[in-house]
Image (spheres, helix red, strand yellow):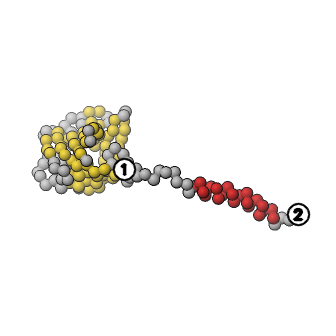
Amino acid sequence: MDTTSYPKKHMKHLLIPFIFGIFLSNCDNGDDAPKKDALTGTWNVQHISGGFAGIDDDYESGVIVWAFSAENGTLNVENKNEADVIYDGFPTGSYSYAILTVEGEQFLEIDGQEQFGIVLSSGQMLLDANKTSTGMGADGFQIVLVP
């Protein structure tokens, strides 16, 4: 009996599944599209109202810009407002964000803190600090953003 041919014979049987496994692991699952969510894109702060003082401030497009990227979960804020106001949102910077969904409603979490209820309608976004996942508040700010 020739014992040197035994391992060669069985190696073929092991090699075929190994090559097939490599082929399958390299297959493209078609999921290369960039990750997106309802907020992805660039938004201009148009109006901020509310708060204890009852502010009501309008902003020109480009003065305060929020850019959401679901791909890396970041919100980049560029705040060029120089007017003396009580509240104009977040200062220029990069923040992490997530969208929380509770009982069918969405809430915006920024840097790990729930900040606003989200309402998207008619091509604009309303961020409402009075609307939280635990109920309604008072004296929060409402920010209207448009693309």
Residue that label 1 marks:
70
| Amino acid found under the numbered disc labelled 1 | Ala
Residue that label 2 marks:
1
Q: Position of residue 123 (x, y in %)?
A: 26, 41
Q: Is residue 69 left or right of residue 29?
A: left
Q: Earlier in the sequence, mark 2 or mark 1?
A: 2
Q: Which residue sits furthest left? A: 84
Residue at 76%, 59% (x, y): give it: 10
Residue at 73%, 57% (x, y): give it: 13
Q: Is residue 102 visible?
A: yes
Q: Is residue 6 left or right of residue 65?
A: right
How packed mark 2 is, by other alpha carbons closer than 10 Å (few <14, some 14-19, many 20 or more), is few
Q: Position of residue 140 (x, y in %)?
A: 21, 39
Depth order, front residue of 30/86: 30
Depth order, front residue of 88/47: 47
Element type at mark 1: loop
Q: Quadrant of the N terminus?
A: bottom right
Quadrant in the picture for residue 145: top left
| Amino acid found under the numbered disc labelled 2 | Met
Q: Position of residue 122 (x, y in %)?
A: 26, 38
Residue at 66%, 58% (x, y): give it: 18
Q: Which residue sits furthest right? A: 1
Residue at 13%, 41% (x, y): give it: 56
Q: Is residue 91 visible?
A: no
Q: Is residue 143 left or right of residue 111?
A: left
CA gap, disc 2 and disc 1 = 65 Å
